[in-house]
Amino acid sequence: MSERFVRTLDLPVPVEILWAFHARPDAFALLQPPWEASEVIELPRSLEVGARARLRTRVGPLWVVIEAEHVAYEEGRSFTDRMLRGPFRAWTHEHRCEPTPGGSRLTDAIDYEVPLGALGRIVGGPMVARRLDRMFAYRHEVTRRECLAMAAATS
């Protein structure tokens, strides 16, 4: 049974700046929270279909390699990655960038399935939800900071 996590961020910058931030070669590394014991092994070469990212992260006492591949791409609007290897039974993350009257909106939507079925949902489900909430609060703060800096640099 899949779970769904969605978090949105409204920004007072054009959608082109929001997209440009995500397309930066350093964006993936910047978005890794400092409290997460993780190491980027391979940065995605682009946001396009087929690009892969790999990182090594700690899950409890174990180190786990997470590998994700971009499986959908719409220039300037969205890209989606799917976990090929990692701690979840399933993980698909859509990043959607949309123009709004006051600027732009980022929506991160993740469909995921914890391992071990019902037991995994009972034991790990609340922990995963808290971890995602904290992680995406951080990621959206970094996105806000970087996009505002990029907008200021272009004005």
Image: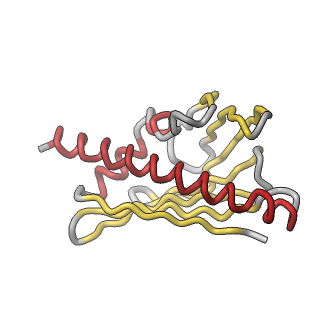
In the rendered image, the quadrant that contains the N terminus is bottom right
Count of numbered tags = 0
Using residue 154 as the reference point, say whether residue 137 is left or right of it.
right
Colouring method of the image: secondary structure
The percent coordinates of residue 39 (x first, y second) are 62, 28
Using residue 121 as the reference point, say whether residue 27 is left or right of it.
left
Using residue 68 as the reference point, say whether residue 133 is left or right of it.
left
- In the rendered view, tell whether residue 87 sits above or below residue 32: below
- Seen from the viewer's position, the closer of residues 86 and 51 is 86
- Seen from the viewer's position, the closer of residues 86 and 155 is 86
The quadrant holding residue 130 is bottom right
- Seen from the viewer's position, the closer of residues 34 and 102 is 34
Residue visible at 44% across and 38% down? 27
Using residue 31 as the reference point, say whether residue 62 is left or right of it.
right
The percent coordinates of residue 92 (x first, y second) are 65, 59
Residue visible at 35% across and 64% down? 105
- In the rendered view, tell whether residue 33 sits above or below residue 131: above
Residue visible at 43% across and 64% down? 8
In the rendered image, the quadrant that contains the C terminus is top left
Residue visible at 87% across and 63% down? 119
The percent coordinates of residue 84 (x first, y second) are 75, 48
The percent coordinates of residue 87 (x first, y second) are 77, 47
Q: Extreme left residue here?
A: 155
